[in-house]
Amino acid sequence: MAQLSGWGRFPVVEGESLSFSDLGHLGRLIEAGEGIPYGLGRSYGDSALAKRCFDSRRFDRFLAFDEASGMLCAQAGVSLAEILRITIPRGWFLPVTPGTAFVTLGGAVASDVHGKNHHLEGCFCDHVSELSLMTASGEILRCGPSENTALFRASCGGMGLTGVIVDVTLRMKPIRGAWIDETLLRIDNLGELFARFEEHAKATYSVAWIDCLAKGDALGRSLLMVGEHAQEGGLSLAPQGRLKVPMDAPGFALNHFTVAAFNTLYYQRVRRKLTQHRVHYAPYFYPLDAVGEWNRLYGKRGFLQYQCVIPKAAGLEGMRGILGAIADSGLASFLAVLKAFGKGNDNLLSFPMEGYTLALDFAMHPRLLPLLDRLDAMVLDHGGRIYLTKDARMSPETFRRGYPRLDEFLEVRAAHGADRRFHSLQSRRLEIP
């Protein structure tokens, strides 16, 4: 037994990490008892935690890659970073990528991850042509939009609760350079930010950093980063060297005053309303990947990431209320980002819907959980939901109200016996049978 946690380091549980490198071994692990698939541990909360975790990191072979079409097939334990190492020099990029490349292929599917281009190109699983899933019985089923479709729709975004994804076939995106032409806009307030998102709705990538402690006329002041793949500049990979946080930061290091000072300096470093420059793909998509174990900055108690989405019609009003509540609380988050979402897909538990999504990191604090409960109520009142991959404390009632296709998911899960074999701390907490 060992102590296991997600990237937020909360909660911490006693459990077994059961590694496998072949399908026979995986089948025996599933037959032996209940558990949940586990990858690189980048889910923030408890969605990949259990007393028994099926660790896919050794199941990491590339199976096929067609350089002409960009079709790639790999085992579920391959990381997005490893995929980029193979494909970028050949002129291909991930069609959708989250904010870290240290995610397994299976984990990306199980979370149906999204990125800075959801408003145009949807979720990760919208680019998956098929996957193989080991079910509770040990049977391996091929699933896709036209084969075992119900199981495919339940598994994409299903948080590992339908079975263990063993391989994935993905359509990659052609690029001519490994660089991004970025436009950086300094935004004075939330109303201006929403107007600029609409103005740049056809840009391939867009994301805003928000000063979530700003109030009054400055509420929602932010930096909006809009990007396009450069048509030149070479296909070089990111440098391999990384800084590393050597120890847990002391509990007093992140507080209202230090984060407010950081936010002010970060915002004011941009002097002009609009600047344009070219950056490598790594700092644009994965700025924190250059810092090893950056989660230690939040101290031994860990942190919670909170991510919600609000429908487009209620976006400005809803986000104004949420940011106002956070600013009034005084609880600090220096990692606060807003993105625009396009239309959702048909996957039963996929998080995005057409609207706006806000993600924030909060160090653990006695006043934090009541604040997040209050934010949950605001999100639900506006017809939104909370992201399962980031969650460690949502109530069953909040979950059910936010995911109206849950009953369909439960039917598929039960039909394949997954309710008898695949459970996580999160599924137990959310009362998923």
Image (tube, helix red, strand yellow):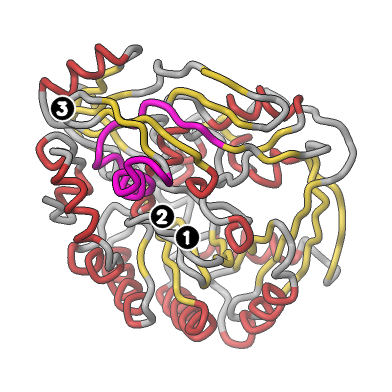
Q: Secondary structure at mark 2?
A: strand
| Closer to us: 296 or 151 | 151
The residue under label 3 is 137
Whole-angstrom CA distance, mark 2 to mark 1, is: 6 Å
Q: Is label 2 in contact with label 1 (beta carbons under 8 Å)?
A: yes
Q: Position of residue 197 (x, y in %)?
A: 68, 72
Locate the N terminus and report the quarter of the image it occupies.
top left
> Label 3 amino acid?
Ser
Residue hosting label 1: 360
Type of residue at label 2? Gln
**Helix, strand or loop status at disc 1:** strand
Q: Between disc 3 and disc 1, whose residue precedes?
A: 3
Left or right for 398, reference 346: left
Residue 65, percent from left and from top: 61, 23
Q: Residues within 10 Å of mark 2 (few under 14, many from 20)?
A: many
Decide if residue 56 is in sight here: yes
Pointer 2 or 1: first along the chain:
2
Classify residue 339 by image quadrant.
Answer: bottom right
**Left or right, residue 223 beside residue 379:** right
Q: Which residues, given as a range, are shown in magenta?
A: 145-170
**Residue at (25%, 18%) from the top-left corner?**
26
Instruction: Name the residue located 38 percent from the left edge and 52 percent from the top edge.
Output: 390
Question: Of callouts 3 and 2, which one flags the residue occurring earlier in the amino acid sequence?
Answer: 3
Residue drawn 68% across and 76% down?
Answer: 198
Q: Which residue is mark 2?
A: 305
Mark toward the viewer: 3 or 2: 3
The alpha-carbon separation of the residues under discs 3 and 1 comes to 39 Å
Magenta stretch contains residue 144: no
Number of residues whose C-alpha sits closer than 10 Å to that of mark 3, classed few (under 14), some (14–19) or many (20 or more)? some
